[in-house]
Image: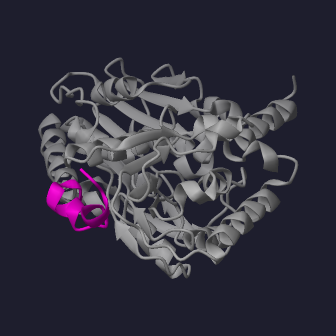
Amino acid sequence: MTKTTNSRVTLRKAWRAIVPPSFRKYGQDVAVALAQRRVEAALANNNERPVRGPIVISGLLAGTKGISRAARLTVEGIRAAGYSPIEHDLAPLFSSADASLALLPTDQPGGVWLMHVNAPEAIAALSRVQPDQWLGRHRIAYWAYELSRVPTSWVQAAKAFHEIWAPSEFVADALRNSGAKTPVRVMPHPVLLGAPPFSSDAFNDDFVVLAMGDLKSSATRKNLIGAIEIYKRAFPEVSSLRRLVLKVQSDDVHPGFREAALTAASGRGDIIFRVGSVTDVEVGQLIGSASVLLSPHRSEGFGLALAEAFLAGVPALATGWSGNVDFMSNVPELLIAHTLVPVHDPSRVYRAADLRWAEPDIDDAAGRLRMLAQSPKLRRELAARGRASVAAQMHAWSREGLDATPLGQLVDV
């Protein structure tokens, strides 16, 4: 099978995972537009007055991608505050033509329907589920995006929701600056409620740098090739006490990545590649085994792995721009200098040449990485400061914080 054929198969699978079966005969943009029209038609003549009821949380809950991990954290955040969320995995709804799946998992009306999937999937779900199942429920969309403005289709989709939750000020500003009129609330991911972190041994003699990314989220944005260049610049000589581990997911989406990464590694035996999907526990083990998590990203909506690293006692060295700055501003030693450049993504996951994202400074990052390698004590101190900042964001998920949202007025505990 050729690389081109492999790429087409992967895209077809991704398409089928998002678009309801009845819309697959259309092109993706057309299908999303049709779904939007169906939703708008359902809303047009309806005078909604949400009443108290249950809270349903929908998402791709069984998946291994970052958005699935984040959706599971949302369920835990709601549950930890004393609410009783009803979980609803959207994967069967998207992958089957069975009309019986076009129902929410409760017969009780009212309450809140919180969808932790991004705009295309959210509109697809709304158009697929029978309107009498969701009209009369307070609808919350939980969205993340990685550029300073969201696509026009997202602004249109926002009209179907009463409120949007965003994981960072960066995402919230992107929605507002794009013209979304729906109220936006910043709700950082409740990372502290995830699987217990595997603690790092900051004084281990080995120095392990971990870089990780899902290429379905754009290889260019995740910039793992940049991580290789930074590591090589910081440590030109191979040492048995140092290594860079690159954890790559969805490498089949970007057939040219592996060749480019191997070329960048130049046969260095201290640069190790790991591919394939991993569970939440395995992610925690990877992060906990590292001395530093390196993320020379070009943009992040939040930076879930970075927050998880701090909780595990691992300092995260990351580009000082976008969503991760919310919880990294108090650790400037770990923020890589950057310039803003026009967005150019060969994979076309992001098509916004009029917008800018970050280009991390390789020399600055290499210098900071060397500094961290020289001082286990500094690594521990910086990780502790980062952890405190991540923990401070948890107030939004306290019972007091959630009661201040529509949940307090509309959800039966």
- Which residue lies at the image location 15% right of the left edge and 27% below the top edge? 203
Range shown magenta: 396-413
Q: Position of residue 336 (x, y in %)?
A: 37, 57
Residue 363 pos. (x, y %): 42, 53
Tell me, yes or no, if residue 98 can be seen here: yes
Whether 218 is drawn above or below 256: the answer is below
In the picture, measured across the screen, residue 256 lies left or right of residue 243, that is right
At 47% from the left edge and 51% from the top edge, which residue is drawn? 116
Q: Is residue 108 magenta?
A: no
The spot of residue 233 in percent (x, y) is 45, 42
Front-most of 44 and 155? 44
Give the quadrant of the N terminus. Answer: top right
Q: How is the image coloured?
A: one colour
Q: Nearer the viewer, residue 249 or 34?
A: 34
Whether residue 150 sits left or right of residue 381 in the image: it is: right
Question: Is residue 411 depicted above or below 200 in this figure?
Answer: below
- Relative placement, left or right, of 402 versus 144 is left
Q: Position of residue 253 (x, y in %)?
A: 70, 36
Tell me what residue is drawn at x 28 percent, y 43 percent.
84
Confirm whether residue 371 shows in the render. Answer: no
> What type of secondary structure mainly makes up the magenta span?
helix
The answer to which of 315 and 16 lies nearer the viewer is 16
Number of numbered callouts drawn: 0
- Residue shown at 22%/30% (left/top)? 196
Q: Depth check: 92 or 245 in front?
A: 92
Relative side of 109 to 260, left or right: left
Q: Is residue 409 magenta?
A: yes
